[in-house]
Every structure is written in structure tokens, then in C-alpha cells.
Image (cartoon, rainbow, N blue to C red):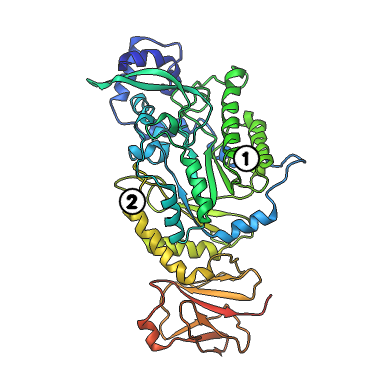
Amino acid sequence: MRRRNFLESSVAAAAGVWGIPRSATSSALIARAQNAEAEPCPESRYRVLNALLDREAMQRGWARSVDPDYQHAPQSAVETFKDLKFGIRIHWGLYCLIGSHESWGLAGANQQFWNVYNVLYQFFNPVSFNADEWMAFFRRCGIRFFTFTTKHHDGFSMWPTKTTQESPALTAQAFENGCEYTRTATNNYSVMDSPYKKDIVGALVMAARKHGVKVGLYYSHVDWHDPAFAWDPFHYQYDSKFTKESDPARWQTFIDHEREQVRELMTQYGPIDTLDFDIGWPEAAAKEIASIAKMVRKLQPNIIMRNRGIGAYGDYYTPERQIPGWNSKDVWKVIYPCGTSFSYIPSDEYRPAEWVLKSLITVCAKGGNFEVGFGPMPTGAWAPEAVERLEYVGEWLRVNGEAIYGTRARAMFQEGDDIWFTSSKDGGTVYAISLEWPGRSFATRSVSPRPGSLVQMLGVQTPLKWQRQGDLVAVDIPADLAEHKPCKQAYVFKFQVDRG
């Protein structure tokens, strides 16, 4: 379809985005749209559109209490989740083809960008993707669980969903002379409509079970591709007058679309360990979104669900791009990209491997799990920056994993800037993790070893001598140990203490 014809046919739907009365379909409006498309999308437009919805409230979810018949995840599942500690958050979708920060490049984008993005599924072909190799890599790096984006806000499904909707598809002319030639196709808008044509979610779940990695699925409540999702200002067919009352059938369509997709994910792959919903729906759909959470609980009784969009029906929360300043007995995990984005960007700037390890230690000391974010490249292979950083952490965990996996937070979880503590679940063992090499002696006021007990440095066979010096416990470090350190960073001292 030629660009001008596309604009003429879509101008009524787009008018609300441009702030023009929807009845204005004059050539002047088309000219304005064309001029706007020729320029980069201004940041101010994103802010204007974002302000039209209370997205923070949608993230929290509207449910402040649950129905009497609802049961949260059993304590056994919660404890298993707390034991995992180190995971990877995998954002992978069409956005990796163009270096977008996940699918957020669509938020406030001009129509020209939408036109290009909506046909990217015809180019997605990760020929180097190998789920078994991914999981072997994760195990080598000490990763015990992952969360994978089954569908981000762009609506593209990484599994063979049976749901259908209208999508643009390039014709044989494709992009020619600055114009885009498309037809309207009714398809699943999924990986099965791409050249790859394989179930990526299914492959990951199967490989994860083989390698003993826990399975987490991410699913966005938002779908900017679904034509029925027109209440969201970031949707390219945004209709400011669309409500539950204005068009009940269309409103029900987006609800039914998600319900069926979530049902597929919760029934086709066996037990799923965690489900991370994202964002949410308007308050007018609060009852329906709670109903979907209840459906998930019925289909997957042991699943741990994030509270985003479902409020009180969730089991845990996820501080994002920040590490809380306190320890908590709540159920939580930090999600934090190693680069500027959760998804792959060719020119991204990555935080160092030492940051990943320090973040893991800090989060575990405070009682949470740490899920570092990386996205694979369009081919399905991992970028060298991701491999180097994760293998660095894996090398450390092979020596010191005892101080991380299965541990719990102490009331005194930190001493100074460089010492962090974890504890065994029975409280009889305390691990003191010194981020820096302590020199000839390691001293702490926060641990009281049992008299006569041994103190060890993980990775060192010979026990270390220790003594009390007033309110300090001082551990002697032999001089030759500095020449044969058990790891490159963060040295762990293991103490036996009286159970509190």
C-alpha cells in the first residue's frame, strides 16, 4: 500500500494521537501527518501520550484484595523460588532486529515507524537459536532460573498461538521508491508467521527441564498490535472515545484475546514455575484481569505470579533497575539490565562483570533473587559481552555458590560498604562476603562464632585461625593465601554460629 493511501485510510484512527478532531479528514490533516512522519518522533509526544493513562496505577493493579476462593502460591513453591537466587531475564522479539529498547520504540512513534515495525515478523529468522545450548550455558554460569518474554507490548507471540488478528504483510513489491506495499493478512502474528516457524517457548521449556533450570514466562497485558486495544494512547489505532460502554464487543475482544493466549501458555507446556505479567488494563477491566489471574492459579496451582497488573492476586514483586535499601521477608526479585536495555542493542554499553556479581551478592544479602537482563542477538546467539559477564559470575559461583543458593537474609545483612552477610536457612551458618581482599586479617563485629568452631574461606581447604579482640572477631589470613586467592573478587568466610 502506498504511503499516501495508507495515511488516507488510517487518518481517522490516528487523529486522536495527533490531537485533531476525528472528523477532520482533509488534505491538510494528511499533510500534517506526512510532515510529522518525515521527522524523528519528539520526546514530548511520548510524554503527552503517556500522561493520558495512569500507567503506574495499571502496573500496581486495581485489586487491593482477592476473592475468598482464591489461593496464593503454596509456601513450598515460595521457598523453592527463594532458593534459586540467580536468574536471567531474556527479552527477545522483533525489536532485536532494529536495536529498539524492547518494543518501547513504538510508544509515541510516528506512523512511518509503525509501518516498518509491523512487517518485521516477516524477517525474524534466528537460525542460530539452540535452546539446549542456552540452558547448558546458563548452568555453566550458575543461572538457576530464567524469565522469557513470550509476548512484549508489540503483541508478537514467540509461541504458536491459535489466536488471530489482522496484520499488514508485505507484497512482492515490498519497499520501493520510498513507498511500502502491503496487504492485509489475517494471521496469528506469531513466530509461526515468520520464516523461522518453530515454537521458541516450547523449545526453551523442554531444554530447561532437561538441564534443571526453572522456567519463568513473561507476558504483557498490553498489546499495541491488536486492533481491539484502541484504548491505549500508544496504540497506532488509538481512539480516545473507545470505552467498555462505547463498543462492548470490541472491548471484550482484547480481553478474550489475552485470556486465550494465557490459557495456551498455562496448558501446553506442563508446570511453569513463575509468570511475570507486565503493565495492566484500565480500571474498567479490573474484574476481567483478576479473572485471568484466577484462571492461571487454577491451571497452575504452584506457579509464582508477579503482581504487576493483578495487584493483590500476585505473589511477589520485582524492583526494577534498583536494589532496595533494606532486607525484606517478602517474596521479591530484582530485575536489572546489564546494558541500557533489557533487549539486545548492537551499540549498547554494558556494566562490568564485577557489577553483576556485586549486585547478586547485595540482593541475596537482603533476601531477594537477582535476575540480570540480557537479550540475544537476532540470530539467536548471545553477544560476547553477555557471555563474558555471565561466565565471570559462573566461575565465582563454582567456588562460592554455597553462600548464595538456598540462603536467607540476616537481620544484620551488611557491615560497612564492603561486607555482606547471608545465612543458611537453619541459621547455624553465616557467610561473610568481603567484596575486597581484606589483607592479613578479616575482622567483623556482626558475627559471633561458636567457641571452638572452625572458620573457613570458601575455596580454601585449610581452616583459618580466629580470635576475639574485644567486640571484634578477627580471622587470620596466611600470607601465601594472597598469592593463591580462590577467586577474583568477593571472598567468603564461613562461620558456625548458635542458631538464633
The label on residue 383 is 2
Q: Residue at x 68, y 56 (%)?
A: 76
Quarter assignment of residue 41? top left
The residue indicated by pointer 1 is: 310
Vertical side of 293 occupied by 453: above or below: below
Q: What's the residue type where badge 1 is placed?
A: Ile
Pointer 2 local density, CA inside 10 Å: few below 14, some 14–19, many at least 20: some
The x, y position of residue 169, in whole percent, is 37, 22
Relative vertical location of residue 149 with respect to residue 427 in this rendering, above or below: above
Q: Residue at x 42, y 47 (%)?
A: 342
Q: Quadrant of the N terminus?
A: top left
Compared across the picture, whether 442 is left or right of 183 comes to right
Residue 398 coordinates in the image, percent (x, y)? 46, 68
Q: How far apart are labels 2 and 1 at the CA level?
A: 34 Å
Residue depicted at 36% across the width and 40% down the height: 126
Is the C terminus in the top left, top right, bottom left or bottom right quadrant? bottom right
Of all residues shown, which one is farthest toward the left? 177
Relative to residue 173, is residue 103 depicted above or below?
below
Q: Work out whether residue 262 or residue 43 is closer to the camera in this orientation and state it.
A: 262
